[in-house]
Image (cartoon, helix red, strand yellow):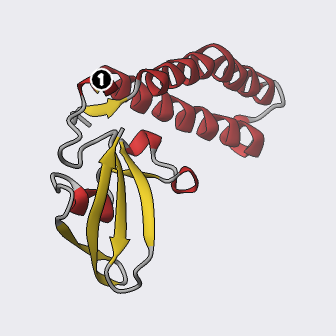
Amino acid sequence: MSDVIYVTKETLELMKSELHHLKTVERPAASRAIAEAREKGDLKENAEYDAAKEAQGLLEARISRMDTELASARILDITNIDISKVSILTKVTITNKATKKSMTYQIVSEKEADLKQQKISVTSPIGKGLLGKKVGDEAEVIAPNGKITFSIDNISI
């Protein structure tokens, strides 16, 4: 994963905190679980040992992935965002042309996406379709359930 990921300062701090927790709490716990299972006898027939080793492998893969993400993370500064067009960190109010339903979403990185908070990923079908559009433009989005046309009503921070 060599792609740059754009995150807010808050998300970067959360990522660092999670990685620190994995390295300082979860990793030693996994090592202890392996040691305890090893003490229980023959490793060839020790399902607890196998499970502990597998859990450790998954943990190490997660730590490695997070290290890579942190190395390629770049902080977005909201004060430098151009609101003349839809871009990452902008809030965009759109209207579905077919249903006439309006909604407001903030375009964010994959790490920060949360539909319940009206935050959609810049790499999602809607996010990709809205990028670069200006107020008054129409965006055609290819979604899993077909083509949807949105009108761009407002762009803000």
Q: Where residue 90 sits in the image (x, y, percent)? A: 32, 42
**Rendered view: 50 above or below 29:** below
The residue depicted at 37 percent of the width and 58 percent of the height is: 93
User: How far across and down, in percent of the image, does residue 109 sit?
Assistant: 36, 41
Q: Which residue is mark 1?
A: 79
* Residue 70 point in image, percent of width and height: 37, 23
Q: Amino acid at mark 1?
A: Thr
Is residue 83 among the parts visible in the rendering?
Answer: yes
Q: Is residue 77 visible?
A: no
Q: Does residue 100 appear left or right of residue 54 in this picture?
A: left
The residue located at (60%, 40%) in the rendering is 54
136 or 20, which is in the foreground? 136
The total of numbered circles placed on residues is 1
> Is 11 left or right of 55, judged from the image as shown?
left
Q: Position of residue 28 (x, y in %)?
A: 67, 16
Residue at the spot 31% in from the left edge and 20% down from the top edge: 71
Q: Is residue 69 above or below residue 23?
A: below
Q: Nearer the viewer, residue 150 or 7?
A: 150
User: Judging from the image, what secondary structure is the residue with disc 1 in?
Assistant: helix
Q: Residue furthest right?
A: 40
Residue displayed at 56% across by 32% down: 59
Where on the picture, by quarter, is residue 3? top left
Nearer to the camera, 48 or 119 = 119
| Quarter of the image that includes the N terminus | top left
Answer above or below: position of 136 versus 1. below
Q: Quadrant of residue 77?
A: top left
The reply, left or right, for residue 118 in relation to residue 87 is right
Question: In which quadrant of the rendered image does the C terminus lie?
Answer: top left
